[in-house]
Image: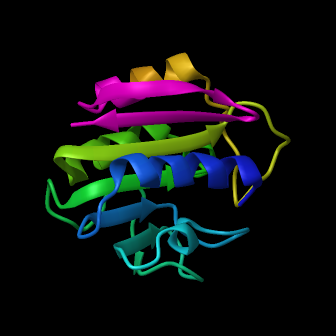
Amino acid sequence: MHDNAIRIVSEFRNKYIKLGDKILDVGSLNVNGCHRELLPNFDYTGIDVQAGPNVDVVVKPYDYPFPANSFDIVLSGQCIEHSQHPWRILYEIGRLVKVGGFVLITAPWQWQVHRYPIDCFRILPDGLVSMLTDAGLKVIACDISDRDTYGIATK
């Protein structure tokens, strides 16, 4: 995880996450760092489409095995650009976050091709706002920081 992503997640943690919150990390496979390292002592579940480090539950794309409104916090960092249908990931995130819960999405808007296993999109703020809104979420903030677009939303 690069320094900018660490800063974004740390600021989000300090402002929006409280002890006792149930956290879901979508796309949690530890390739180069992970959110769990920044969220010790939290009820954290990492999901991904493949097994590996930091993955608690292997899921099918766009079909997560949790009831609606299951999580206080849903994070997804550097994941949605690797999906052929990133809006479908955000629909699932919108389904899973509790009313009053918070979502943090980060994705590159400017970066080299980095297939893992595919690399489909670069996400700009207006596109992320559109997808978050379509997923039934209210956008609190969305901007570019260094090479990342980040969005914070609530339900």
Q: Is residue 133 magenta?
A: yes
Q: Nearer the viewer, residue 6 or 71?
A: 6
Q: Position of residue 98 (x, y in %)?
A: 17, 50
Q: Position of residue 147 (x, y in %)?
A: 75, 35
Q: Is residue 12 magenta?
A: no
Q: Above or below — where is 132 with respect to 96?
A: above
Q: Position of residue 107 (x, y in %)?
A: 61, 41
Q: Above or below — where is 45 with respect to 97?
A: below
Q: Which range of residues does the magenta coloring cover?
A: 131-155
Q: Nearer the viewer, residue 76 or 38?
A: 38
The way the protein has been coloured in the rendering is: rainbow
Question: Left or right: 135 with respect to 67?
Answer: right
Q: Is residue 89 visible?
A: no
Question: Left or right: 7 with respect to 153?
Answer: right
Report how many numbered discs are placed on residues in the image.
0
> Quadrant of the rendered structure where residue 37 is?
bottom right
Judged by its main secondary structure, the magenta piece is strand
Q: Measuring 28% from the left and 68% from the top, which residue is drawn there?
A: 19
Q: Above or below — where is 124 with respect to 119?
A: above
Q: Measuring 64% from the left and 49% from the top, which residue is drawn there?
A: 7
Q: Nearer the viewer, residue 52 or 54?
A: 54
Q: Position of residue 151 (x, y in %)?
A: 48, 33
Q: Measuring 27% from the left and 37% from the top, which residue is drawn there?
A: 154
Q: Is residue 143 visible?
A: yes
Residue lying at the far front of the rendered structure = 14
